[in-house]
Structures are given as structure tokens and as C-alpha cells.
Image (tube, rainbow, N blue to C red):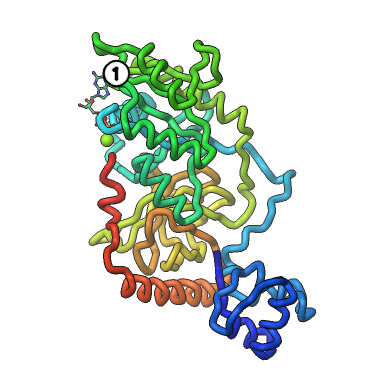
Amino acid sequence: GETITVQELAEKLKKTAAEVIKKLMNLGVLATINQEIDFDTAALIAGEFGVEAELKVAVDKEALIMAEPEDDPAQLVPRPPVVTIMGHVDHGKTSLLDAIRQTNVTAGEAGGITQHIGAYQVEHNGKKITFVDTPGHAAFTAMRARGAQITDIAILVVAADDGVMPQTVEAINHAKAANVPIIVAINKMDKPEANPDKVKQELTQHELVVEDWGGDVIAVPVSAKTRMGLDNLLEMILLVAEVNELKANPNRRARGTVVEAELDKGRGPVATVLVQNGTLNVGDTIVVGHAYGRVRAMIDDKGRRVKKAGPSTPVEILGLSDVPEAGDILVVVEDEKLAREVAEKRQMRKREEILKATAKISLDDLFKHI
Ligand code: GDP
Ligand code: MG
């Protein structure tokens, strides 16, 4: 969360640090002048001094732009589920993603899928499903570290000829920790040595009991190779989505999360963003982590230029000042000056952190699992 030092807060409130420390003590918080306190506490102290509610937001510009106004329930409409594929290496995550994607190539798009933007949407029975094809582990770890959650449903791929393996268990634990429902895809069913019962038995050791064994976990036998069971898998995803009543408000400023980003030689910083709420428009002023800018162009997963992107839509955006990081949150800001100010403050903070860090895991390390 956002923090502010006691000294900074005192300055903003036009009080002495001693006065602020005293108020903190009244709240049972022992603080020194240079101590960082969180925004909620700062707001509480501001309130203690009789500062109005609006003023407390001005205490921190960053908190101001990141604030997420509550949606009017009447404005909420169903949105497509966002699905991440997880599982042990070589169990078929990439193959499954590719197979689902190809199955959904319509005649008009045939051959048109040259674009790779890290996430894509398919349609099944007239309903959309968004697949994020960053490796599940990275999506969970990198993104959760930043407090971002992009996944509604986790597909746990387990190869029927191999069974539950260490990364399968890791994936189960990640999904459980994030409280994300799991659908098991028992893959490689085309292989003669496929043994789905062994997979189901092993899953029970990790508290995943499949439906035909009396539990509530949906397991779908599939083959990424022959495409057997893919329709059924999509069906089950939509079923789980329906049960979870996923909703968003398209009629507000967009908020989203970066799935991946890079510096493109010709186009400059390019970020693939999953819009999670609101609608992102070309021309919007945005802050994305330590980057900011105006959305100059947006490209969808089919390589088409689009002018707007609504909830659960993955889109590639151009026009940023810098390359953001996977997991960074995108917000739309009315005021361009404010956008730059916040981004620059973050850049400074980031530089300090880099100087401090002795060893830093590169994104490549983080994303090497797929
Ligand atoms: P990932 O590491 O989980 O992304 O796995 P890949 O998608 O790269 O697949 C690993 C290997 O398994 C590749 O050689 C695939 O061709 C193969 N594979 C994936 N799915 C199937 C399947 O359904 N049947 C068969 N026979 N092979 C598969
Ligand atoms: Mg892979």
C-alpha cells in the first residue's frame, strides 16, 4: 500500500511532527518522525485534525489516482471469465492454449493469427472466454506480489501419462492461495499409456476430489493433439464462470493489469494489458506502474486496431513513456500533469530500489516456465 512519513504528513496537514506523533499515540501507534505510516492511518490522523474527507485523498496523489470507486450495482454487467493455464512442465499447457486458439479461428481469420499478445479471447456458443498465456506460476507470483489478481479460473493441466508432479502441486497451492477455482484438464488422453484414474487418485492427495469420485472438482479429459474434449473444457469454463457471476462496469474509466511488456524497436514501449473494469479508449491518459502516456493505438489479439476495449479484453497498447512490468496496474487519469507526476515519483522510487537491490530476478527468469 501507499505510505507517507510522519514528517511529510505533518507538513501536509500544516502541523508539527510532535502534534502528529501525539495523535498517533492516542491511536496506540508509537511512531518516530521518519516513520512510514500507511495511507489509512494517515487519513485517520487527518480526520483527527478535522481535515475534510476530500482533503485526506490529497494527502497522497498516488492514492488519489489508484483509488477505485465502488461501482453502482445497477451498472454491473456480466464479463467474460479470465482463465490461466497452469501445470507441470511438458504436460501440454502451450499445446492446449494453441489448440483452443486454433479451434476458434474463424474462416475470415484463417492465417491471420500471427499476432502474439500474451492473452487472447475465444468464443464458445456465443460467449467469450479470455485466456492469459503467461505461464500460470509467473502470473500468480509476479502479479500477486503486486496485489494484482487477473485470474478468475485456473485450468490445471495434468498429463494422463505422467500424473501429478511437483509443479502440479505448486500450481494447486497457488490457485488455492489465490482462492481461484480449479478445473482439471487431464491431457494427452490420446496416448495409449494414458491413465486418468491414476491422475484422479493422485489429485485426492491434494484435496482435489473430482466429481465422478464424489467431490466437486470438474475434470475434463482432453487431448491437445487430437483436440478431443476441448469443447467440453470450454463448456465447463463457462459453467464455472456463470456460477461465479463475474461482472464489471463498462461505463467507467478503465483499470487493468499488464500481462507482458517490451520495448519494440519500431513502436516504442508496447504493453499487453488486460482491461479488468471500465473501458479503455484510444486517447486516454494513463499511468501504468512507473510509465505514463496517452493511448496512441490499441491492437487486439487478432492483430486488429481497435478504438476501445472493455472488461476482460486483452489489448496491446502503444504510447507509453517507458516499458512497464508484468503485474503493473493501469489506471486512466483525467489530468495529464498528475499522471506524469505520479509516474515520475515511482521512477525515482524504482531507481532507489534498483540501487539497493543486490540481485534482482529478471522477468526472463520469472517467465521461463512456459
Ligand atoms: P508445456 O511445457 O506444459 O507448455 O507443454 P507443451 O505444450 O510444450 O507440450 C510438451 C510436449 O507434449 C510436446 O512435445 C507436445 O507436443 C506434447 N503434447 C502436448 N499435448 C499433447 C497431447 O494431448 N497428446 C500428445 N500425444 N502429446 C501432447
Ligand atoms: Mg510451454
Question: With 94 as the anchor, is 124 left or right in this view?
Answer: right
Amino acid type indicated by mark 1: Lys
Quadrant position of residue 115: top left
Q: Which residue does the image show at 50% across and 32% down from the upper left?
A: 128
Whether residue 236 is visible = yes
Q: How many marks?
A: 1
Q: Is residue 275 above or below residue 198?
A: below
Q: Which residue does the image show at 64% across and 47% down from the upper left?
A: 249
Whether residue 108 is visible = no
Q: Which residue does the image show at 49% across and 58% down from the upper left?
A: 330
Q: Position of residue 12 (x, y in %)?
A: 64, 84
Question: With 327 as the anchor, is 99 left or right in this view?
Answer: left
Q: Residue furthest right?
A: 50
Instruction: Please tell me how crowded label 1 is: few (under 14), some (14-19), or many (20+) other residues with Cα within 10 Å.
Output: many
- Residue nearer the viewer, 326 or 206: 206
Q: Position of residue 235 (x, y in %)?
A: 50, 21
Ligand 1 lies in quarter: top left
Q: Is residue 271 above or below residue 173?
A: below
Q: Which residue does the image show at 48% across and 24% down from the upper left?
A: 208
Which quadrant, please, contains the C terminus? Answer: top left
Mark 1 residue's CB less than 8 Å from ligand 1: yes
Q: Is residue 118 above or below residue 262?
A: above
Q: Position of residue 133 (x, y in %)?
A: 36, 39
- Residue nearer the viewer, 285 or 205: 205
Q: Position of residue 339 (x, y in %)?
A: 51, 71
Question: With 46 as the anchor, is 134 left or right in this view?
Answer: left
Give the labeled residue for mark 1. Answer: 188
Quadrant position of residue 360: bottom left
Which quadrant, please, contains the N terminus? Answer: bottom right
